[in-house]
Image (spheres, grey):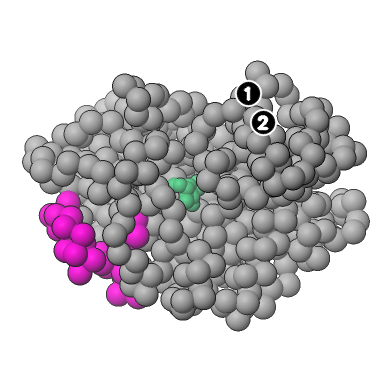
Amino acid sequence: MVRFTAVDLGASSGRVMSAAVAGGRIRLREEHRFANRPVRVAGTLHWDVLALYQGVLDGLRKAGPAESVGVDAWAVDYGLLDGDGRLIGNPVHYRDARTARCTERVDPYEVTGTQFLPFNTVNQLLCERLDRAETMLMIPDLLGYWLTGTIGAERTNASTTALYDVRGRDWAWELIDELGLPRRIFPDFAAGASPLRPDVAEEVGYATEVVKVASHDTASAVVAVPAETDRFAYVSCGTWSLVGVELPAPVLTEESRQANFTNEAGLDGTVRYLRNVMGLWILQECLRAWGGPPLEPLLAEAETARAAAVIDPDDPAFLPPGDMPGRIAAYCARTGQPAPEGPAQVVRCILQSLALAYQRAIADAVRLSGRPVEVVHLVGGGSLNTLLCRLTADATGLPVVAGPVEATALGNALVQARARGLVGGLAEMRELVRRGAGVRTYRPGHPYEPRERG
Ligand code: LFR
């Protein structure tokens, strides 16, 4: 048996998972979970990146020795280092309002293939004073640097900056020049592994190395989609829902730009052709506004609650943290719909609206890419939400295969296993996931088929 450690940082929590690969199977165990609590300081919303790093160290210590470690996290955010390699200030959270002031002045879709999102790295960098900055590191690369002392960029996450040339597979240097951003801050791309710094090895209790995995969490999640053919759509469903297809080459047409589809880099030169749907964030913020009631009873009530209204989850009003039930009511008033009454109806309205947004994104992805789709793979935390899975099957008219829940950590560990020669390309990785993961299939129009594997 060979053990790997997957560090997966999400918008609301960080997780350190052990993955054991043996006998053609992969099994995960959660070793440590810690909250990721953004902090508003003097009006700006920051990530508490040192607390996250501490959580990673605690997790590595608890998990114990492993063949290697991989780090993945959300996209677009970064830390800036000065000439001595020290972090300049705390990274700013992509949900901070600062980018309203500074937005990309050019639209280079044919180069970057990136959808417009107000918080894309490019817009954030245009808000920064960069005179002291020597290096920009995306969050997983920043943590990797602290663990190993080695600086290097990684393509799956770099491709979310809107400063990456998706065909040339390099930073989009001309665009960087055109925007007046300093070339020096964009590090070389690195692959392979680097050993833990000796002081870090001492702190966690063992030496190992950090492998550059597909460090954008969504890229790792797509690696672990248990698809059997290439005719699948995925919904990587957590705080965000990333909805799309996997392609061999980007789609850079004007139609695709207008539909706000992004071409993010996937493993082995694949393209994650997808759209960001606001995701369970809206539900999470409602729960927070209601004082944190348990979700299960609410979901049970929502099963039979009246679907009073439909919202567009991607309305900009739902992006920043805040009073989500109030914003839903305001949206309904604005669009002439009766507002949902009480939490169960609100939950129903959110899930129904998400399922419809998935249907639209999948239909658009199929139309714009020409890739036929026979099944929807719903992975991540949302795959546990039976009602959401059923509504998605009904909205898309396609079977929804839900799971694995921890697709991201699995994808992270699988790339490490490959670095050790334990598994081959994507098809083999997915085969391994199919053998190990419990998945459940939901067919349109049926409550669900209790077909569990694994
Ligand atoms: C999901 C994700 C999305 C990205 C968003 C912001 O966790 O990484 O792919 O668009 O977070 O970084």
- Location of mark 1 (residue): 289
Q: Position of residue 106 (x, y in %)?
A: 30, 64
In contact (CB < 8 Å): disc 1 and disc 2: yes
361 or 207, which lies in front? 361
Residue count near mark 2 (Cα–Cα under 10 Å), binned few <14, some 14–19, many ≥20: many
CB of mark 2 near ligand 1 (< 8 Å): no
Nearer the camera: disc 1 or disc 2: 2
Left or right: residue 410 compared with residue 439: left
Q: Is residue 255 found inside the magenta-colored segment of the image?
A: no
Rendered residue at 71%/41% (across/down): 332
Seen as rendered, the residue at the extreme top is 291
Q: Quadrant of residue 357?
A: bottom right
Q: Can you say whether 3 is above or below 445 in the image?
A: above
At mark 1, the secondary structure is helix
Question: What numbered label is drawn on residue 206?
Answer: none
Which of the two discs, 1 and 2, labels the residue nearer the N terminus? 1
Range shown magenta: 161-185
Q: Position of residue 23 (x, y in %)?
A: 60, 56
Q: Amino acid at mark 1?
A: Ala
Q: Residue 45: horizontal and vertical position, in percent?
A: 38, 30
Q: Tell me the SS state at disc 2.
A: helix
Name the residue: 63% across, 23% down.
289
Dot 1 crowding, Cα within 10 Å, few <14, some 14–19, many 20+: some
* Residue type, mark 2 in image: Pro
Rendering quarter of residue 82? top left
Task: In the rendered view, tell whether residue 97 sits above or below residue 241.
Answer: above
Q: Name the residue at 19% across, 64% down.
A: 178
Compared to residue 12, the image places residue 139 above or below, namely below
Q: Position of residue 70 (x, y in %)?
A: 40, 47
Q: Is residue 451 visible?
A: yes
Whether residue 172 is in magenta: the answer is yes
Q: Which residue is mark 2?
A: 325
